[in-house]
């Protein structure tokens, strides 16, 4: 993991400091590897949507959303599955690990948190698609819950 710091200057004044982290991850069989650069303000979320449930086989998935230019494959080629008109999910054809998701508008890449080498580094801060949560899955946290998509950094 690499940390970088960037000062944003507006009209000659320091406004804010953005810290970015370079994180790596990959699939279970190590055929596919990726690197992401996560900046302050990017959202890690739990997703309770039905599509995430179906492709993961679990009641919830955890993601971090990054800008497309902050994601790159470093080894292998992922296989695409278009799960809806707006979303394409990418997985390892060999082991089946779901690695990331892209949107039709190319605004973000959602990376599955559990495939990070250090998954504990980006804990989710919100629940998305709470309206599709499976009733028997009880939440024990007080994180914000959004009926649909949580607000991502534009």
Image (cartoon, helix red, strand yellow):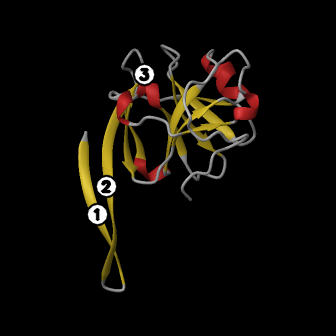
Q: Residue at x 56, y 35 (%)?
A: 142
Q: Residue 67: x, y in percent? A: 49, 52
- Quadrant of the frame with the N terminus: top left
The CA distance from mark 2 to mark 3 is 27 Å
Q: Which residue is mark 1?
A: 6
Which residue is at a point 68% across and 42% down the rendered structure image? 146
67 vs 103, left or right, is left
Local SS, label 3: loop
Q: Which sits earlier in the primary sequence, circle 2 or circle 1? A: 1
**Which of the image's four quarters has the C terminus?**
bottom right
- Marker count (numbered): 3
Q: Mark 2 or mark 3, which is nearer to you? A: 2
Left or right of 71 on screen, residue 47: right
Q: CA distance from mark 2 to mark 1?
A: 6 Å
Task: Give residue 130's quadrant in the image.
Answer: top right
Pointer 2 residue? 19
Q: Secondary structure at mark 2?
A: strand
Q: Earlier in the sequence, mark 3 or mark 1?
A: 1
Sort mark 1 into few (<14), some (14-19) or many (20+) by Cα contacts within 10 Å: few
> Contact, CB < 8 Å: mark 2 with mark 3?
no
Secondary structure under tag 1 reads strand
Residue 86 vertical placement versus 13 (above, below): above
- Splitting the image into 4 quarters, where does residue 46 fall? top right
Give the labeled residue for mark 3.
27
Q: Are marks 2 and 1 in contact (CB under 8 Å)?
A: yes
């Amino acid at each position: 993991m690499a940390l970088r710091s960037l000062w944003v200057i507006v009209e000659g004044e320091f406004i804010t400091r953005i810290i970015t982290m370079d994180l790596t991850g990959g699939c279970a069989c190590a055929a596919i590897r990726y690197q992401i650069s996560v900046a302050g303000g990017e959202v890690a979320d739990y997703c309770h949507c039905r599509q995430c449930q179906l492709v993961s086989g679990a009641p919830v998935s955890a993601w971090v959303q990054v800008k497309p230019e902050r994601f790159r494959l470093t080894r292998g080629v992922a296989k695409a599955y278009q799960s809806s008109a707006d979303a394409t999910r990418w997985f390892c054809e060999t082991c089946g690990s779901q690695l990331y998701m892209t949107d039709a508008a190319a605004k973000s890449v959602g990376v599955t948190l559990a495939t990070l080498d250090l998954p504990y580094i980006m804990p989710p801060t919100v629940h998305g698609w709470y309206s599709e949560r499976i009733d028997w899955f009880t939440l024990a946290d007080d994180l914000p819950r959004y009926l649909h998509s949580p607000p991502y950094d534009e």
